[in-house]
Image (tube, rainbow, N blue to C red):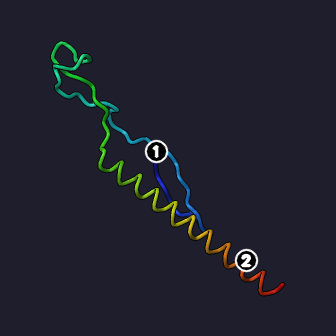
Amino acid sequence: MKQSDVKGGGVSARIVNAGGDPYVPSYDPSSPDADAEGMVATPNVDMTSELVNVMTARMSYEASAKTMKVANDMMKTTLDAFS
């Protein structure tokens, strides 16, 4: 997923093809899915970078939610001052 800033505020997200093979061969002759040579197709996923992406998305969401709450509180304070 590719995230980018939007002019005027906000974030745009789009899915991009990571490229490469979705599976990589690994040697595991004890697996029931192994072929005659003992090779198994394992997902081509870097768990470290995926975890970092999830944590970044979570923190971005929390920051956005706090920003919206502060904006809401400021609007309420302004309206209360004029009423």
Badge 2 element: helix
| Residue at x 65%, y 74% (from the top left corner) | 71
Asked whether the residues under the numbered discs 2 and 1 touch, taking CB atoms below 8 Å apart as contact, a structural biologist would say no
Vertical placement of residue 44 versus 1, above or below:
above
| Residue at x 50%, y 59% (from the top left corner) | 4
Vertical placement of residue 50 versus 33, above or below:
below
Question: Disc 2 and disc 1: Cα gap in Å?
Answer: 40 Å
Type of amino acid under label 1: Val
**9 left or right, relative to 46:** right
Q: Position of residue 37 (x, y in %)?
A: 15, 16
- Position of the C terminus, as image quadrant, is bottom right
Mark 2, residue position: 76
Say which quarter of the image contains residue 46: top left
Type of amino acid under label 2: Lys
Q: Looking at the image, which is closer to me, 8 or 64?
A: 64
| Residue at x 45%, y 61% (from the top left corner) | 59
Q: Position of residue 78 (x, y in %)?
A: 74, 83
Vertical placement of residue 18 versus 11, above or below:
above
Say which quarter of the image contains residue 31: top left
**17 left or right, relative to 63:** left
| Residue at x 51%, y 66% (from the top left corner) | 63
Nearer to us of marks 2 and 1 is 2
User: What numbered label is drawn on residue 16?
Assistant: 1
